[in-house]
Amino acid sequence: MVMPKATSTPSESAHQRFPSPAEQQWEQRVLDPALAKNPENPIGAASGVNLDDAGNARFTTISGTEVDRLYTEADLPREYVTDPDTFLGLPGQVPYTRGIHATSYRGKLWTMRQFSGYASAEETNARCKYLLAHGGSGLSIAYDLPTLMGYDSDDPQSEGEVGKCGVAIDSLEDMETLFDGIQLDSTTVSMTINSPASVLWAMYLVVAEKQGVDWNKISGTLQNDILKEYIAQKEYIYPPAPSMRLVVDTFEFGALQVPRFNPISISGYHIREAGSTALQELAFTIYDGVEYVEWAVRRGLRVDDFAPRLSFFFNSHNDFFEEIAKFRAARKIWYRLMTERFGAKAERSHKLRFHTQTAGVSLTAQQPRNNIARVALQALAAVLGGTQSLHTDGFDEALALPTEEAARIALRTQQILAFESGVAQTADPLGGSYFVERLTLDMENGAFDYFRKLDAMGGMVKAIEIGYPQKEIAEASYQYQRAVESGEKIIVGVNDFVVEEQQQAILYIGDEIRLQQTEKLKRLRARRSNEEVQRRLAELRRVAALDPDKEPVVPGQLSSANTMPAILDCVRAYCTVGEICEALRDVYGSYTEASWT
């Protein structure tokens, strides 16, 4: 059963600031004369500076949170100061604010997992091998829009989109080509796929099967986060309830059959890309995790059987200290939720593990090489925040998918951080910073404020249906854009420091990919057993129509209502992505978002 909601702790109480005599004396003797001689710049000279109601300079983070002039012991609760080892914890020790591993990166560097995927499976296979040859330690596969939406390349809905924002995968045949020459028991793979996640995962598993690889030995991550699709990215197929059923099916199947694979990457990245603040990204992402756990527990799964393989995916944006605080707070919040709310006993259930990608939305088409500096800053924040794996964006991604040169520079950025900067030599280097600790605490408290609101609405699915997170993000996005257009927030090369530019060479993907994929599909349908295809699709419809809540859950055994075995059989028969998703549409229908005000 789900445990009671998390209660307040001393860290959530209102904090009164009592500056020390030394600080008061500094204000009188040093600060006041300095301000009289050189007032703080009220607007325009630095990003995030504007005026308060009294006309004084007001400094804010990129999310609009006010930043004070100075942070000292007075900004932290007494428990932080008197017993930091208990209240804050040490690396590898509860509540994991300072990291989930005692040795941090001294024992193992983060995985350098560069995003790849464009055009055909053949071309993406070549890019993957290129990245691995140049020092990448994991792969992250992007799929094109038709694949994300569950359509084959020859479907009329796919016209103009095949291979444009990722690789086109129509069948097991394409997945075999994608991983040709890449041994899946020695390469971790992350797949950015959501509504058809179980279908693409099944294809990946069958490729491993054909390579002779034991499923117990493969590791990687399936994004599979449908809630953030309804909130932010809008690449959904089915209504929320059956979509959640498919996600829980992967939890159950993964725990029993593919124990080293993460069946979900609960993703704040796209929430942030849609315009949320850092706090909204943190709160909505973690609460999505709560929703997934609650649905799985209601199904009858034991929390410690699946929670150790839950993973998260965050955005790293430009506001350096705010991002570090967000990552640190996330670990502490997840520990509290898993212990207080769900009663998880296994240590691995308590530890939040996350992947980070630098902020695509921060990249500018103007002076695109400036993005190299932005990406380096964002990557450094992710590392100082303790990420387990990292993708760095190509500098030209505001214009198109990255060129080979841009992808190499992005990977080299990670390697410079890892091997030249020294930041990997100590755990949580900014732990104990008054500023970072205050920001971390504010992130934690703000997230629990959101959790209480979402609990009162009946959970995230209910909140999505009334448009609550969507409206919160839309308002935050509007406020940020207003600040940019007014000049309160400076974007170098966009609303200040503008120059005349030459055109940047980009990676162009033509419509010939659709023609190639269409021809492949014709050949595939001509040589496969279409009678077997129809049998397998009929069986999938039958299983999908079962009510999993009415099927008895036996620990250690796969539920008869789990859709994964039927999907795997469809894949082995070379059913296409579109055919499998259409079979599920026959049972579940498709979803249209209701308008909200």
Image (cartoon, grey):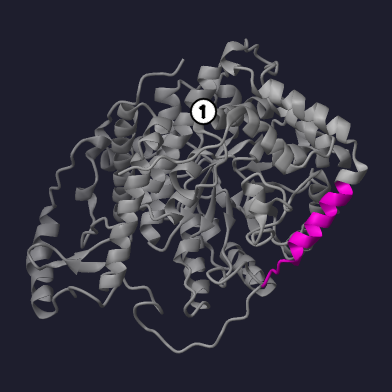
Give SS at disc 1.
Answer: helix
**What's the residue type where badge 1 is placed?**
Ala
> In the rendering, at what x and y percent does residue 166 appear?
66, 58
Residue 39 among magenta residues? no
Looking at this view, name the residue that lies furthest to the right: 527
Q: Which residues are magenta?
A: 508-524
Question: Main SS type for the magenta part?
Answer: helix
Q: Splitting the image into 4 quarters, where does residue 50 fall?
A: bottom left
Residue at screen point 50% across, 47% down: 234
Question: Quick one: 264 or 20, which is closer to the camera?
Answer: 264
Q: Is residue 481 left or right of residue 231?
A: left
Q: Is residue 263 left or right of residue 241?
A: right
Vertical position of residue 376 compared to residue 284: above or below: below
Q: How many marks?
A: 1
Question: Quick one: 520 or 409, which is closer to the camera?
Answer: 520
What residue does disc 1 label?
241
